[in-house]
Amino acid sequence: MSPTPFTGAFDDPAVGAAYQARLDALAATGRSMHAEADLVGRYAPRFVLDAGCGTGRVAIELHRRGMTVVGVDLSESMLAEARERAPELTLIHDDLATFALDRTFDLVLIAGNVPIFCAPEHRDALVANCARHVVTGGHLIAGFTLEGGYTLAEFDAAATAAGLMLTERSATWEGADFVPESSYAVSILTKA
């Protein structure tokens, strides 16, 4: 399989710095930046894969909370920012649809609209490959906008085909009730 063609200018060296600057500006307003980490913490995983880790915002916080975290991202520019902030983390430049780490994790996190950035024809492979990295009985948590051309029906079908079972769904990382009108979904799945 060829590398996943992601949309956007992920190879542009300025992307990581610009993205991190936006996150820093949000954090400076006092906004909580750790809802994803709070949710992951409910499951008390020892080993977490941050799939699509970007500049490391979530991976760094999970590590700070005592979890062993590996981050994977296709953007070398984003990873450069993450490495600068947390050189102690294992951060891997690779394609989520095809990477193979030869290990499994208690929890795999797909946050930050990662499936939306992936070309539609590779989204099922992304979900399946991330699911392969979840230990039996472990969890995959994915959050993405429903206004980006990827439906929950498509995601759910890919997750079911990958051996994952939906256990909970909310409209936000903080756990707001999911309703049919929701524009965002956070899905918590368990690997059978």
Image: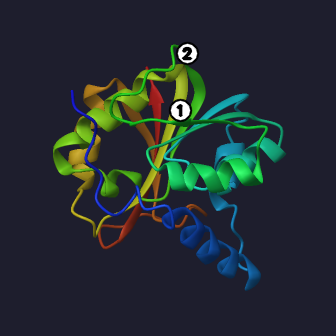
Colouring method of the image: rainbow
Residue 129 occupies which quadrant of the picture?
A: top left
The x, y position of residue 21, in whole percent, is 63, 75
The x, y position of residue 162, in whole percent, is 31, 26
The x, y position of residue 44, in whole percent, is 73, 35
Pick whichever of labels 2 and 1 is earlier in the sequence: 2
State the separation of the CA atoms marked 2 and 1: 15 Å
Which residue is at 69% across, 47% downward? 83
Q: Is residue 56 visible?
A: no
The N terminus sits in image quarter: top left
Determine whether 160 is above or below 132 in the image: below
Q: Which mark is residue 103?
A: 2
Residue reaching furthest bottom?
Answer: 29
Q: Is residue 43 visible?
A: yes
Q: Is residue 94 left or right of residue 152?
A: right
Which residue is at 73% across, 53% downward? 84
Q: Name the amino acid type tagged 2.
A: Arg
Closer-to-camera residue (69/77): 77
Q: Which residue is disc 1 drawn over?
A: 139
The C terminus sits in image quarter: top left
Between disc 2 and disc 1, the foreground one is 2
Which residue is at 21% across, 49% downward? 153
Q: Name the amino acid type tagged 1.
A: His
Residue 20 occupies which quadrant of the picture?
A: bottom right
Which residue is at 33% across, 34% downward? 97
Determine whether 17 is above or below 151 in the image: below
The x, y position of residue 190, in whole percent, is 47, 30
Q: Secondary structure at mark 1?
A: strand
Closer-to-camera residue (84/96): 84
